Amino acid sequence: MLPLSLLRTAQNHPMLVELKNGETYNGHLVSCDNWMNINLREVICTSKDGDRFWRMPECYIRGSTIKYLRIPDEVIDMVKEEVVAKGRGRSDGKGRGGAQRGGRGGSRGSFGASRGRGAPSGRGGGGGNNKPRGK
Amino acid sequence: MASTLDSYVNRSVCVITSDGRNFIGILKGFDQTINLIIDDSHERVFSSTQGVEQVQLGLHIIRGDNVVLIGEIDNELDSRLNLSEIRAEPLAQIHH
């Protein structure tokens, strides 16, 4: 499971984000992207020492400033469902792809066979030359 | 020797971060930047004056930038530790 898949699944859930500078942000995750940049809503910011607090309706945090995120335990089970659903989709795709590939492989095989048939005659000529050498 | 963290997935691991903290939990996933999913985690806080304090934390995503070390934990050995008896200086943070 990928950390960013888990984060995506945690959208609309409450979370705690600790930044590298020690500040923490508590809020609901609105959105996130592939760089871990995140949008939080209904945020409470706590200073590094935990002695000062700020409330803000929303904030945007650059992913590179994050140290870690604490996420509700149940979110990990919700990812599994998504992954399974995706996995089914992928296996279907593979099945179809495999059939196509098989078809192409068959045509390639017959092409190879015709070549193969051609080759012995060519080689046969060569073989004629080779045979005396072989013997 | 594995060159990825694949062999650590679903096992107990210890993660040391660049701020000198020590997280223990089950590694559930990782990516190419070493972002980690640590489930059922707790932090072990070392002190030179009292035993190791364990702080329950739960599900975590640790950003790869901060990860210094990931080690597999031998659960049997770990369960034999008497953490309340262990005294140790906490690790210092990394200075850039």
Image (cartoon, coloured by chain):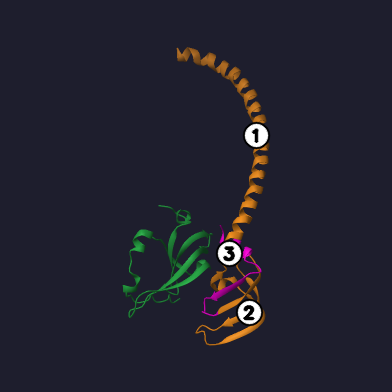
The answer to whether residue B74 is visible is no
User: Judging from the image, what secondary structure is the residue with disc 2 in?
Assistant: strand
Q: Amino acid at mark 1?
A: Gly
User: Judging from the image, what secondary structure is the residue with disc 1 in?
Assistant: helix
Residue A13 within the segment the image draws in magenta? yes
Residue picked out by circle 2? A43
Letter of the chain that mark 2 sits on in the rendering: A
Residue picked out by circle 3? A74
Dot 2 surroundings within 10 Å: few (below 14), some, or many (20 or more)? many
Marks 1 and 3 close (CB-CB < 8 Å): no
**Residue stretch rendered in magenta on the structure:** A1-23
Looking at the picture, how far across and down is residue B86, in whole percent? 32, 73
Q: Amino acid at mark 2?
A: Val
Looking at the picture, how far across and down is residue A43, in whole percent? 63, 79
Residue at x 49%, y 13% (from the top left corner): A131
Q: Amino acid at mark 3?
A: Glu
The mark total stands at 3
Residue at x 55%, y 18% (from the top left corner): A126
Residue at x 65%, y 82% (from the top left corner): A56
Mark 1 and mark 3 on one chain: yes
Residue picked out by circle 1? A102
Query: In this rendering, is residue A127 above or below B13?
Result: above
Dot 1 surroundings within 10 Å: few (below 14), some, or many (20 or more)? few
Looking at the picture, how far across and down is residue B64, in whole percent? 51, 66
User: Judging from the image, what secondary structure is the residue with disc 3 in?
Assistant: loop
Letter of the chain that mark 1 sits on in the rendering: A
Q: In which quarter of the view is residue A69 placed?
A: bottom right
Chain in green in the render: B
- Give the camera-side residue of B7 and A73: A73
Q: In which quarter of the view is residue A115 placed?
A: top right
Outermost residue on the bottom side: it is: A52
Chain in orange in the render: A
